Image (tube, rainbow, N blue to C red):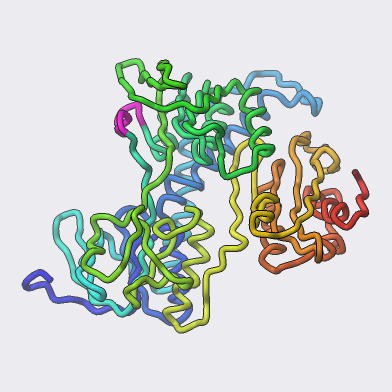
Amino acid sequence: MVVGDFAEERDTMIIGAGPGGYVAAIRAAELGQKVTVVEKEYIGGVCLNVGCIPSKALISAGHRLQEAKDSKIFGIKNIQAPVLDFKTTQAWKDHQVVDRLTGGVKMLLKKHKVEVVTGEAYMHDNHTLRVMNGDHTGQTYKFKHLIIATGSRPVEIPGFKFHGRVVDSTGGLNLPEVPKELVVIGGGYIGSELAGAYANLGAHVTILEGTPQILPNFEKDMVQLVLKDFKDKGVDVITGAMAKNSEQDDSGVTVTYAVDGNEQSIHADYCMVTVGRRPNTDDMGLEYTDVKLTDRGLIEVDDQGRTAASDIFAIGDIVAGPALAHKAFAEAKVAAGAISDKKTANDYVSVPAVCFTDPELATVGMTKAEAEKAGLSVKVSKFPFAGNGRAISLNSMDGFFRLVSTKDEGTVVGAQIAGPGASDLISEMSVAVNGGLNVEDLALTIHPHPTLGEVVQEAADEALGFPTHI
């Protein structure tokens, strides 16, 4: 503690105001805790400001542009070709979408009487931290309980330092113009989503992926639909490609990569690197606490998010599991409840994963291969969107719904969706997997017609041996 610095006492403190941090703050306040949040940059964290929310805004803008360019199949003939004003697009994204949501979070924190302290937190021991401000002044706090929700940051790879025309996903979301040529290094969900968005906005995109397949967390037949869409849009997908280095000049950036040892180069307006994220657990003084880290820098926690220091909890991207905002939401509520002596615990059996490509991909629970590896005897039931009336009327017939259930009792253990509305449809399947429902429960649930959700009932009927529309 700094000489002359009198420590202020707090009950529950939270480091980070991203999806995990602000939800933890609200839930803790609702449970009667007096809460102080420390945030060094912006309320809402990466997700609301420079991640999942603004990326979906650009994706939506790209879809609107494509619809405006060609809706002939609906009998709509364009008299004048649409023109994209990307500055207006970016302004809408920043002010009408991001500012609206972050402003809402600020209002909720204020409503729940959550104290917000701006600055960077450094741990001194298991019950003390110091918040440093930009002007090099600081304040020390003694806390009863702490939730660490510091999130993650993009991984920087050798030869591709983030500056100028080499950008991370944050920079990729804030480009001043739509590039004529864009290179995306990394074909995971962030890279694939933004590649599709910029392709829809008019860029020619090249994806360099080091592994044999983009979107490795989704099954191959799902990924094939995205690859088909990329091909239709002129997106070049190069797998087994190892990025070597980049060189910038006034006209753009040259990216050198190797496939099977053969080096090649691409000249582009921008290069966006999306090869993963690193947990923000370094340089915050955790070594002065009893908190334990893994070799990857993740914080070890129990099923309530409690660390080896019993009054310190950790949630979100800095603990094991997928780096997903909705996972952080759930962990936040559990940790806040644990501090209030609620018998809460994290259960990761039904964490859905979604990728907003064209078509959308979504999965929850186990795939057939995962279920069989776990020793389960399962049945797979599949229904194509081409047989769904609503999908046909939307002219979005590519894709399918797949249900994985046990052969003995028909218990739903997983589902995969590739097609229109997958990001919304997966929620019903999360309920089914989490609740241990069986296929008969789904089949007997009346789904409204005509809707995309009928694919669930159709697949359940098939699982029972009574398919209707296939």
Residue 133 visible in the picture: yes
Residue at image x 36%, y 18%? 254
Residue at image x 61%, y 43%? 218
Q: Tell me the quarter of the image containing the C terminus.
A: top right
Total number of numbered labels?
0
Q: Looking at the image, which residue sits at the far bottom? A: 341
The percent coordinates of residue 38 (x first, y second) are: 31, 64
Of 275 and 53, the residue lying toward us = 275
The percent coordinates of residue 256 (x first, y second) are: 38, 20
Q: Is residue 163 magenta?
A: yes
Q: Main secondary structure of the magenta part?
A: loop
322 displayed left or right of 12: right
Q: Is residue 391 magenta?
A: no
The percent coordinates of residue 462 (x first, y second) are: 87, 52
Residue at image x 75%, y 46%? 401
Q: Tell me the quarter of the image containing the N terminus.
A: bottom left
Quadrant of the rendered image containing residue 159: top left
Q: Looking at the image, which residue sits at the far left? A: 3
136 displayed left or right of 177: left
55 displayed left or right of 404: left
**Quick check: 75 above or below 90?**
above
**Quick check: 5 above or below 71?**
below
Quadrant of the rendered image containing residue 166: top left
Of 375 and 340, the residue lying toward us = 375
Residue 266 visible in the picture: no
Q: Which residues are magenta?
A: 158-166
Quadrant of the rendered image containing residue 434: bottom right
The percent coordinates of residue 205 (x first, y second) are: 51, 24
